Image: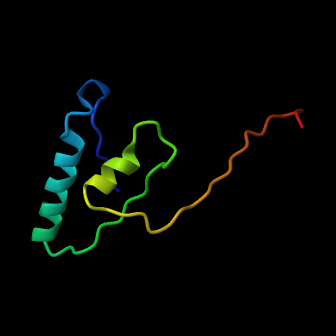
Amino acid sequence: MTTLGVRRPYRRRGLGEALLRAAFGFLFARGMRRVILHVDSESLTGATRLYQRAGMHVVGVDTQHAMELRSGVT
């Protein structure tokens, strides 16, 4: 798994999309014809919109539930 990110002060300048497109070109040149990634669709960073602008589309949605368990608390 590889992580791609842009630090907050540099966001909204097209860097994320440029990095994605460069990565897609790199992978395509090496024979990869399909790329899958997982994203937190509720993230406030707008990551899903970024991926869609870069040509990706949503193919599935997973829901996760979490609960913190503590001793003596019900």
54 with respect to 46 (left or right):
left
Q: Is residue 2 visible?
A: no
24 with respect to 52 (left or right):
left
Among all residues in the image, which is located at the extreme left?
A: 29
61 with respect to 5 (left or right):
right
Q: Residue 59 lies in what quarter of the image?
A: bottom left
Q: Is residue 45 above or below residue 54?
A: above
Q: Is residue 55 above or below residue 18?
A: below
Q: Position of residue 72 (x, y in %)?
A: 89, 32
Q: Residue 69 lies in what quarter of the image?
A: top right
Q: Position of residue 1 (x, y in %)?
A: 35, 56
30 with respect to 12 (left or right):
left
Q: Nearer the viewer, residue 66 or 63?
A: 63
Q: Is residue 35 visible?
A: yes
Q: Is residue 45 above or below residue 65?
A: above
Q: Position of residue 35 (x, y in %)?
A: 30, 67
Name the residue: 38% across, 45% down: 47
Name the residue: 9% across, 69% down: 29
Q: Residue 33 lies in what quarter of the image?
A: bottom left
Name the residue: 48% across, 49% down: 41
Q: Position of residue 42 (x, y in %)?
A: 52, 44
Q: Nearer the viewer, residue 72 or 25?
A: 25
Count of number-bearing discs: 0
